[in-house]
Image (cartoon, grey):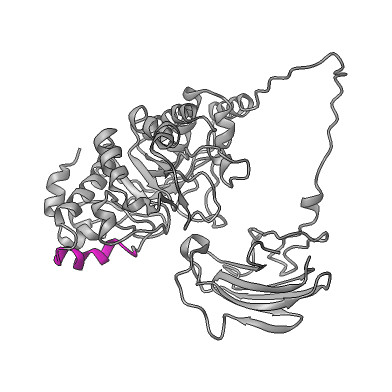
């Protein structure tokens, strides 16, 4: 075990502030001078992806049943075994932190990440999370319980405020986190994008210090979700320890002047660094180098565990009446898949939607494209308005783009790119740009989007029409 207090005392101010923000997308800052290693983290909870984003050339990982399937098992011991499997694979990929489990509650069937969460029951969710955390951390990987707190929907999650009274907060939304901390010993908590009762989670000392640390006895580190809102002066004083990813926008180097000017007490900085290093020390990450190794394929025991988890997640009780004839009819519903064609290597059309609809998106990984990454993209389609009127055409993306309607240029984000600082694409997007257009009900409009990548860690473009009330 390292002497964390001595390490903090030996750090310079510049080194301490550097530790409060990530080094990169999935890495923390190291201090070679004092033997503090760079620590990597990986996404979860259904598998340890490794240090990279989806679509990058990463070693295959074991895919666990999703959170909802694990929830249907009602089996904390099984969750612990699954956590141990993921923890082992995280270590093999050079990671000592896992960004999981997700313990938000199922509150609406359309919530975009319900699959990742365990259930609508706070007690069940908490007991499963505690088991999962024990399994992960038993392999020397800290678990990061997310998203703290009241992030039960994806709609406008980076700006919305969840207004929850004290009783509902404590009896429902906080319970899974409390059990993960008290029964699982979680060493990581990730704050959510949303606000709670009008205030950003990264600025709520009552939750991050008074409740989480003082009342529950949490001894680990608190980090932001990726590109979540943080404030240079308020967040650190409120109990936030780490801004992710790096380089920091609010913490990190930006703290130097705030500490020197007295706007942030250096004692608060020391406490945050001590919590970060203390959490890493508890899993042995300060003493053991963690280079990636050749991942081991799943063993027969692993496969047996996965089959058991998948089967137990399909438990169904059927109440049959006298008129049940026992006949089972299976149909294949492949229409949606048959509409898509994806072949980046051939530089052909990425997708075709033949039936129209109210919108959609395409995500795809090219099969051995001739270039290291796609640098330009042309998207064409037809929009048939349902009503006549003026609509706002909105463009958002990581990179630059132009939008044409019936071959007329209506939005040019290439010649005069909008400034950075948008909220889309995990905070990597440029700010939205828009223009008003007149559309006629039933009259087809040809849409063409020309997109140009700028070499960011993520690429993406989003184009849509909207009225005051709804999108077309």
Q: Residue at x 57, y 57 (%)?
A: 55
Quarter of the image where one finds residue 144: top left
- Residue 266 visible: yes
Towards the viewer: 119 or 371: 119
Towards the viewer: 347 or 26: 26
Taking the image as shown, residue 285 lies to the left or right of residue 265, namely right
Quarter of the image where one finds residue 21: bottom left
Q: Residue at x 18, y 52 (%)?
A: 268
Q: Residue 314 appears at what percent x and percent y?
A: 65, 27
Secondary structure character of the magenta stretch overall: helix
Q: Is residue 455 above or below residue 56?
A: below
Residue 325 drawn in magenta: no
Towards the viewer: 316 or 63: 316
Towards the viewer: 398 or 237: 237
Q: Is residue 276 above or below residue 355?
A: above
In the displayed image of the protein, which residue is found farthest to the top? 322
Q: Residue 325 appears at what percent x and percent y?
A: 88, 18
Taking the image as shown, residue 339 lies to the left or right of residue 36, namely right
Q: Residue at x 54, y 35 (%)?
A: 298
Q: Residue 130 appears at what percent x and percent y?
A: 41, 29
Taking the image as shown, residue 21 lies to the left or right of residue 58, namely left
Q: Which residues are magenta?
A: 249-262
Q: Residue 99 appears at what percent x and percent y?
A: 43, 45
Please identify the quadrant where the N terminus is shown: top left
- Residue 377 visible: no
Taking the image as shown, residue 160 lies to the left or right of residue 306, namely left
Please identify the quadrant where the C terminus is shown: bottom right
Q: Residue at x 34, y 60 (%)?
A: 23
């Amino acid at each position: 075990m390292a002497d964390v207090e001595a390490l903090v005392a030996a750090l310079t101010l510049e080194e301490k502030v550097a530790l409060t923000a990530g080094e990169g997308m999935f890495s923390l800052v190291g201090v070679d001078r004092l033997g503090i290693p760079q620590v990597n983290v990986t996404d979860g909870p259904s598998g340890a992806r490794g240090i990279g984003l989806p679509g990058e050339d990463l070693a295959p990982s074991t895919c666990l049943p999703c959170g909802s399937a694990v929830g249907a098992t009602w089996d904390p011991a099984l969750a612990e075994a699954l956590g141990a499997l993921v923890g082992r694979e995280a270590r093999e990929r050079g990671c000592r932190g896992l960004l999981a489990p997700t313990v938000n509650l199922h509150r609406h069937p359309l919530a975009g990440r319900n699959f990742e969460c365990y259930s609508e029951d706070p007690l069940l969710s908490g007991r499963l999370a505690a088991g999962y955390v024990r399994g992960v951390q038993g392999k020397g990987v800290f678990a990061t319980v997310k998203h703290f707190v009241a992030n039960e929907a994806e709609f406008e999650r980076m700006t919305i405020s969840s207004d929850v009274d004290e009783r509902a907060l404590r009896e429902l939304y906080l319970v899974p986190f409390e059990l993960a901390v008290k029964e699982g010993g979680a060493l990581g908590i990730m704050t959510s994008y949303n606000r709670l009762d009008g205030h950003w989670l990264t600025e709520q000392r009552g939750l991050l210090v008074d409740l989480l640390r003082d009342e529950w006895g949490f001894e680990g580190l608190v980090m932001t979700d990726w590109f979540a809102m943080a404030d240079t002066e308020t967040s650190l004083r409120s109990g936030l320890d780490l801004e992710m990813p790096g380089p920091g926008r609010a913490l990190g180097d930006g703290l130097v002047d705030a500490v020197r000017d007295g706007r942030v007490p250096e004692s608060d900085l020391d406490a945050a660094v001590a919590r970060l290093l203390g959490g890493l020390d508890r899993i042995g990450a300060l003493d053991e180098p963690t280079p990636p190794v050749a991942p081991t394929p799943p063993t027969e025991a692993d496969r047996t565990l996965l089959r058991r988890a998948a089967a137990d997640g399909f438990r169904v009780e059927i109440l049959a009446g006298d008129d049940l004839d026992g006949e089972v009819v299976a149909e294949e519903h492949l229409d949606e898949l048959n509409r898509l064609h994806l072949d980046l290597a051939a530089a052909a059309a990425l997708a075709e939607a033949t039936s129209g609809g109210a919108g959609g998106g395409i995500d795809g990984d090219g099969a051995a494209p001739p270039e290291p990454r796609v640098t330009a993209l042309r998207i064409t389609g037809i929009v048939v308005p349902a009503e006549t009127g003026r609509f706002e055409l909105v463009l958002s993306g990581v990179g630059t783009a132009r939008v044409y309607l019936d071959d007329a240029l209506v939005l040019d984000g290439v010649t005069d790119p909008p400034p950075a600082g948008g909220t889309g694409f995990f905070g990597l997007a440029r700010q939205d740009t828009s223009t008003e257009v007149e559309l006629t009900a039933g009259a087809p409009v040809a849409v063409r989007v020309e997109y140009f990548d700028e070499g960011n860690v993520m690429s993406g473009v989003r184009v849509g029409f909207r009225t005051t009330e709804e999108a077309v």
